[in-house]
Amino acid sequence: MNRRHLLALAALAWPATARAQNAPPPAILRPHALLEGEVLRVSDLFEHAGPHAERVIAASPQPGRRMVLETQNIVNIARQNGVNWRPLTGTERIVIERPGRTVPRAEIEALLRDELARHGIEPEMEIELPGLIPPMIPAQAWFQLALEGVSVEQPGARFQATLVVLADGAGTQRMRLAGRAVVTVPVVVATRRLALGEVIGPNDARLSRLRAERVRPGQAQQISQVVGQELRRPMAADQGFALVDLGPPSIVQKNALVTLLLDAGGLQLTAQGRALEAAARGATVPVMNLASRNIVEGIAIAPGRVRVAMGAIPVAAR
C-alpha cells in the first residue's frame, strides 16, 4: 500500500476517532439509591448519567418504603434518557429506598388528650387507640399535627377524629382515629423486687395509675399506706401492694433469742427464751422458755423483749 492510500485511510478514520474521544464515559449503575426528596431522577440511578441527569422519571417511594427496578426497567430508562449504559449480565437491579420515621405515638396521644379534655374527658383517663399504626414521614423532616372532626359519645367515652400530618418533603396525610377513654385509679407499685419481711422505704414504692377494671379491692392507693410497713410476701417490680400483705414492722423475729419479762408483786423477773413466730409491737407471740422448755404467750414490747403476764399458763410443755 503506497503513501497516498495510507493518508486516505487516516483521513477517513479521524472523524470516528475524534467522536470516540469526545463521547461521554459509560454510565455506572448504582446498586442502591437513597432518596431524600419526593422525586426520582436519572442521576439517582446512574453515575455519569449524561445530559439528562437531572430529569425526573418517577415519584419517590413513600417515607420508610422501597422499590426495586429490574434489568429491563433500567434498560428502558437508560434508552429513554440517553444514558450510555448497557447491562453486562442481564441480572442487574437497583434498590431505591426513602428513609423515614414514624410520628411518635406519644405526641399523637398528647394532642388527642388535649382535644378530648375540651369534650369532658378527664386528664387522668387512659387513651385507648386499638390498631393505631403511626404514619411515616421523611427521616429529617419537620412536621406538625392537627385534629379535625373530633366527636365523643357518652356513655362509654368513645371518640372519633381525623389526624392531619403536615411534613416537609411529603404530602398532607390524613388518618382516621377511633378509640375510647378508660377510667384509671391511683395504685402504689413496687419500684424493685422486694423480699419477704422487708420494711418498705420511700424509694421502694411509687404511685402509678391503672385501669379501674384491673385494680382489685384492697390495693394500696397512697404512698403513706405502704412506706414503713413490712412485707408478708415477696413482690416483683411494678407489682401493686395489697393492704393484706402489709403489716407493722416486726420487733421480734422468728427463732430469735428474746428476753422474757415477768412482773411479780413489784419484782421483775427475766428469763431467756426463743420466739417461735415474728411479731410486731403489741402483738402476741409464742415463746419457748429455754430453762423450763415450756411455751408461753407474751406481748412484744420492744426489740427482743416480750412481757409475760403473771400467772400465764404455758400453752405447751416440752
Image (cartoon, helix red, strand yellow):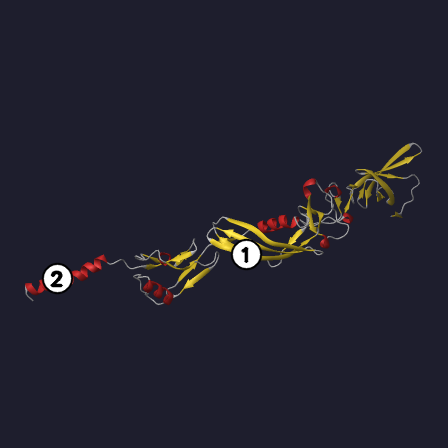
The disc at residue 276 is none
Q: Position of residue 169 (x, y in %)?
A: 46, 52
Camera-side residue of 298 and 66? 66
Query: Mark 2 belongs to which amino acid?
Result: Ala
Residue where numbered disc 1 is placed: 174
Residue at the spot of label 2? 11
Relative horizontal placement of residue 107, taking residue 315 as reference (left or right): left
Q: Nearer the viewer, residue 258 or 207?
A: 207
The one of 8 and 316 positioned closer to us in this rendering: 8
Confirm whether residue 263 shows in the render. yes
Amino acid type shown at disc 1: Arg
At 19% from the left edge and 58% from the top edge, which residue is drawn? Answer: 18
Q: Is 211 positioned to the left or the right of 165 in the image?
A: right
Q: Residue at x 88, y 48 (%)?
A: 316
Residue 141, percent across and down? Answer: 48, 49
Classify 266 as above or below 252.
above
> Secondary structure beneath disc 1?
strand
Using residue 37 as the reference point, say whether residue 294 is left or right of it: right
